Image (cartoon, grey):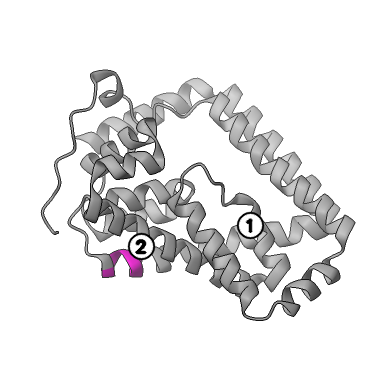
C-alpha cells in the first residue's frame, strides 16, 4: 500500500500542460461568474423563504439534518461532477457559522478519505471513472510533480482548496499515510472552509455585502486583464521552478 504507484503514460500534449499555464482570463471570468451566481441565488432563496423558516425546518429534523448535510458534502468530494459550492455557502445559514464550518469540514474529510481509499484499493482506472479522463491527467501530474510529503499536502490544502477533491485522489497514489492526510486536511482546511461559510452567511442576508463582492470581483478581473502578460509570465516561471 505504501509503494509509490507509477501512473500510466500521459500524452505529450497533456504532460506539457500544467495548472499554472491553464490560468487565464477566461477561467477567471467563469470562476468569478459562478461564484457570484451562487451567492446571488442563495441571497434570493433566503430572502424568499426567510432565514428563520430555514433554520426552524433544519432544527426540526434533529440529528438527521447534519447527517444528511455531511453525507451530501462527502458525495460532492468523491463524485467530481457534483459541486459543493451551494451547500458550502448555505451551511452557515442552516446551522450557524461555527457548526456549519465543522459540518462542511467533516464532509470534506469523509469524502476525501474515501477518495484516498478508492485510489489505493482500486487504482487509476476506477478513479478515472469518478473524475473523468481530463481530470485524471491532472491528478497524475500533481502526484508526480508536487505531492512529496505533508508539507506539500498542507500547501495544496490551503492554496488549492477548490480542487482538493482531485488532490485527495492523488494522495492515494503517494506514500503519504492516511492518518497524515486526515490531520493535514483538517488543520489546513479549517480557515478556507470558515471563510467560505462566513461569506455565504453574510452575503445571503445582507445586500450590501453581496454588492461588495460584485465590486471586488469586477476589480480583480479588470486588474488581471490589464496585467495579464506579466502575471502569466510569473505563473509560468513559478511552474518551471516547481518542476525543477
Q: Which region shows up in magenta?
A: 179-184
- Label 1 crowd bin: few (<14), some (14–19), many (20+), radius 10 Å: many
Image vertical order of residue 168 relative to residue 241, above or below: below
Q: Residue at x 32, y 25 (%)?
A: 17
Q: Nearer the viewer, residue 20 or 101?
A: 101
Q: Choose the circle earlier in sequence order: 1 or 2.
A: 1
Q: Can residue 19 be seen from the camera position used here?
A: no
> Which mark, by number, is residue 239?
none
- Label 2 crowd bin: few (<14), some (14–19), many (20+), radius 10 Å: many
Helix, strand or loop status at disc 1: helix
The quadrant the C terminus occupies is top left
Residue highlighted by disc 1: 87
Q: Can residue 151 be seen from the camera position used here?
A: yes
In which image quadrant can residue 29 be found?
Answer: top right
Q: Residue at x 24, y 21 (%)?
A: 11
Please state if 69 lies on the left or on the right of 75 as rendered. Answer: right
Magenta segment includes 114: no
Residue highlighted by disc 2: 113
In which image quadrant can residue 194 be found?
Answer: bottom right
Q: Nearer the viewer, residue 108 or 241?
A: 108
Q: Residue at x 27, y 40 (%)?
A: 125
Magenta segment includes 183: yes
Amino acid at each position: 500500500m505504501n509503494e509509490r504507484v507509477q501512473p500510466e503514460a500521459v500524452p505529450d500534449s497533456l504532460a506539457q500542460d500544467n495548472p499554472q499555464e491553464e490560468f487565464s482570463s477566461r477561467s477567471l471570468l467563469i470562476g468569478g461568474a459562478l461564484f457570484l451566481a451562487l451567492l446571488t441565488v442563495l441571497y434570493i432563496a433566503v430572502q424568499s423563504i426567510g432565514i428563520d423558516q430555514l433554520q426552524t425546518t433544519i432544527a426540526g429534523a434533529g440529528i438527521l439534518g447534519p447527517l444528511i448535510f455531511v453525507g451530501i458534502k462527502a458525495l460532492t468530494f468523491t463524485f467530481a461532477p457534483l459541486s459543493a459550492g451551494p451547500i458550502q455557502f448555505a451551511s452557515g445559514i442552516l446551522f450557524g457559522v461555527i457548526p456549519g464550518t465543522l459540518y462542511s469540514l467533516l464532509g470534506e474529510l469523509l469524502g476525501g478519505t474515501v477518495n484516498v481509499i478508492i485510489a489505493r484499493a482500486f487504482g487509476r482506472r476506477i478513479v478515472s471513472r469518478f473524475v473523468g479522463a481530463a481530470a485524471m491527467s491532472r491528478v497524475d501530474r500533481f502526484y508526480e510533480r508536487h505531492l512529496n510529503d505533508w508539507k506539500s499536502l498542507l500547501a495544496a490544502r490551503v492554496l488549492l482548496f477548490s480542487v482538493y477533491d482531485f488532490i485527495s485522489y492523488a494522495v492515494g497514489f503517494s506514500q503519504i499515510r492516511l492518518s497524515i492526510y486526515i490531520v493535514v486536511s483538517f488543520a489546513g482546511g479549517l480557515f478556507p472552509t470558515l471563510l467560505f461559510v462566513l461569506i455565504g452567511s453574510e452575503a445571503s442576508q445582507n445586500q450590501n455585502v453581496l454588492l461588495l463582492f460584485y465590486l471586488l470581483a469586477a476589480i480583480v478581473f479588470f486588474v488581471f486583464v490589464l496585467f495579464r502578460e506579466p502575471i502569466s509570465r510569473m505563473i509560468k516561471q513559478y511552474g518551471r521552478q516547481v518542476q525543477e
